[in-house]
Image (cartoon, rainbow, N blue to C red):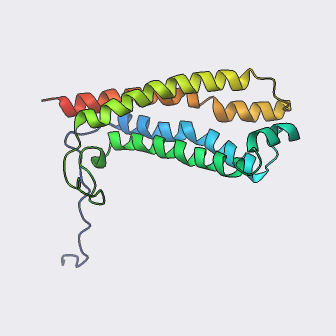
Amino acid sequence: MTASTLPLAPARPATAAPVPSWARHTAAAVLWASLPSALWRFAVVAGVPLGLAESEYTAMLVPGWGYLLLPLLSVFQEALAFLTLGLVRPWGEVWPRWVPFLRGRRVPVLAATVPAALGSLACTVYGVLFVWTTLHSDMAITPWGEWVMTVCYVPLVAWGPLLALVTTHYYRRRTRR
């Protein structure tokens, strides 16, 4: 038998210490927890009937700016959720090569954990308060629309606690000697 002449695939960069599967799954769950509400806002802008009265659509869209604001809010929310993956991936320990001036340098532990911890606190407060006020508001919405809104926004409550778990694991993993 002969050896294969196919080129070897480049080795995937690894984290300094192994990341358990529960931490990787928890970080991915943050993306999944924030996605339904972002999709709901995109649907509002696209004019998908979500059971809202015409007056509710008009109030959310703030004609002109709302068509830009809601999608930007959704993209910003998902970008912040995506940063959680940095706590379980190599690019959360060493700056990627596309980052000018920092490429290849180690990411200081506190430079990642302090913003992540503050983000966890903010996401917990935001999630709970936003979901509470949204679900207890007097919106002109059909029962079906209320169900869809609930399904889309309740997962936001999990974002903060999930981020706290991943942040705590990141800190312990990076400071373990």
Q: Is residue 12 left or right of residue 72?
A: left
112 and 163: which is toward the camera: 112
58 and 147: which is toward the camera: 58
Choose top left, top right, bottom left or bottom right for residue 87: top left
Question: Where residue 26 sits: x, y (%)?
Answer: 42, 34
Question: Where residue 104 sits: x, y (%)?
Answer: 20, 54
Question: Where residue 71 sits: x, y (%)?
Answer: 63, 49
Work out whether residue 53 can be spotted. Answer: no
Question: Where residue 161 sits: x, y (%)?
Answer: 46, 25
Work out whether residue 156 can be spotted. Answer: yes
Specify the quadrant that holds the N terminus: bottom left
Q: Residue at x 43, y 31 (%)?
A: 119
Q: Residue at x 82, y 45 (%)?
A: 49
Q: Is residue 86 left or right of residue 131?
A: left
Picture layout, residue 129 above or below residue 35: above
- Count all numbered tags in the image, as a single digit: 0
Picture layout, residue 98 above or below residue 36: below
Specify the quadrant that holds the C terminus: top left
Q: Residue at x 43, y 28 (%)?
A: 120
Q: Is residue 84 left or right of residue 156?
A: left
Q: Residue at x 77, y 48 (%)?
A: 63
